[in-house]
Amino acid sequence: MKTRSAKSGLIWSAIDRIVTQVAQLCIMLILAKQLGPEAFGLIGMLAVFIAISQVLVDSGFSSAIIRKTNRCETDYSTVFIFNGLVALICYGILWSIAPFIAVFYNKPELVTITRWIGLIVPINALGVVQKIRLSVLLDFKTQAKASISAAVISGSIAIMLAYYFDLGVWALVSQTLLLSIINVLLLNILNPWLPKTGFSMENFKDLFGFGYKLLLSSLLESIYANIYPLFIGKWYDATKLGHYSQANQLSSVPAMTMTNILQRVTYPLLSHMQHDTNKLDNTYLLTIKLSCLVVFPLMTFLSISATPLLIFLIGEQWQPAGIMVSILCCGYLLYPLHAINLNLLQVKGRSDLFLKLELIKKIANTIILFCALPYGITALCLGIVINSYFALFVNSYYTGQLSS
């Protein structure tokens, strides 16, 4: 029964990620042709602040509950209440620091943009428990219905706002908000749930004991993933950040889609096998082979064809992003391997080692960032590739120590 559920989960997770990513990519290309690099650069300037807020809201509880074998309704209620409170606090902080963000980038319009786009933090918090419950059941079909519908509807409205109402960057803000609102609404309609108990400090401590290390790791990952837009936006300008943001998104689509599929399915699946070492190791090796078979050819093709493809699809104004895509693909093709290795660490209960590895990798990445920054965005992209290969070596070494 678990095998059948896993196969169904893999199929629906793949449908969800592939259709959603393809839809968002197509929408992005249509919007990019109309809006230009600067509008995307303005949104990119806020990426690190929103990402950190989202990580704080989750606080590692999603992974902690999925891994827990004797979970109960009190766990869900505790997480829901905690997430809601943290989300409101994070949004309050975003509202307060919006003027300082605008001054940092010398972009006055970011005050209003930050306060609007920051609303996705409390909105997304309303759907966290629904996603956890569905993931525990390996029910990715329901999640697929919600996320695909949200991507298509929000993207269609954004295109209309950009082309027919000429709203510029506000079309992107509207898309971001609507994506969260529609997704959360559909999750609550398709999988209704309300907290049945109050907040339990005992359950909170139990979950947080495992989750806080993942929280720290996720914070490091979010800062790392978004520190480049932060410095590019400050060091250069919104247009160059727009080029980088789109190059980063385009080059990451195949790898991150596969990564998301594998993470969503393999983590709960491997959690069920945590006491069967042979079965766990065999499944781990199988997912490694599958990811390489799918991702490597796609990333190679995209790397080779990036510049002419971008010019053909969205015009000459995006040509500088072409070389960035070609370089970044060489690093992103390893991301599914990173995800599988780190999933295995979590399943083995080694969130302490997970955190240690993240610290090592992020220190290395920070050194690479500051060494490359004075030499331009191309050098920064090369730095990302170097760090990805270093991360593969570190992750694989320690994962190998835990597997048979």
Image (cartoon, grey):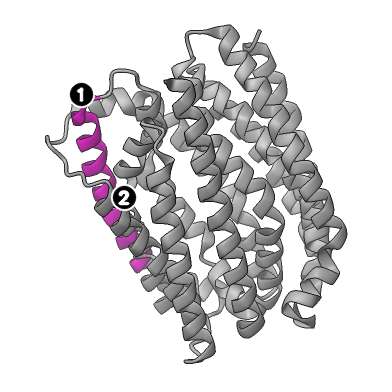
- Bin the neighbour count of mark 2 within 10 Å (Cα to Cα): few under 14, some 14-19, many 20 and up: many
Indicate the amino acid at tag 1: Glu
Q: Is residue 189 left or right of residue 317?
A: left
Distance between the alpha carbons at the discs numbered 1 and 2: 23 Å
Q: Quadrant of residue 58?
A: top left
First along the sequence among labels 1 and 2: 2
Residue for point 48% across, 84% down: 160
Residue 202 marker: 1
- Is 84 part of what is drawn in magenta? yes
Q: Is residue 296 left or right of residue 183?
A: right
339 vs 163: above or below: above
Q: Position of residue 213 (x, y in %)?
A: 45, 29
Q: Position of residue 119 (x, y in %)?
A: 34, 65
64 vs 90: above or below: above
210 vs 154: above or below: above
Indicate the amino acid at tag 2: Gly
Q: Nearer the viewer, residue 67 or 244?
A: 67
Image: magenta residue range: 72-96
Quadrant (top left/top right/bottom left/bottom right) for the C terminus: top right
Magenta stretch: helix, strand or loop mostly: helix
Residue 316 marker: none
The residue labelled by disc 2 is 127
Circles 1 and 2, Cβ within 8 Å, touching? The answer is no
Q: Is residue 164 visible?
A: yes
Residue for point 66% across, 34% down: 338
Residue for point 61% across, 34% down: 339
Q: Position of residue 270 (x, y in %)?
A: 51, 21
Q: Is residue 126 visible?
A: no
Q: Quadrant of residue 121?
A: bottom left
Q: Secondary structure at mark 2?
A: loop
The outermost residue toward the left is: 197
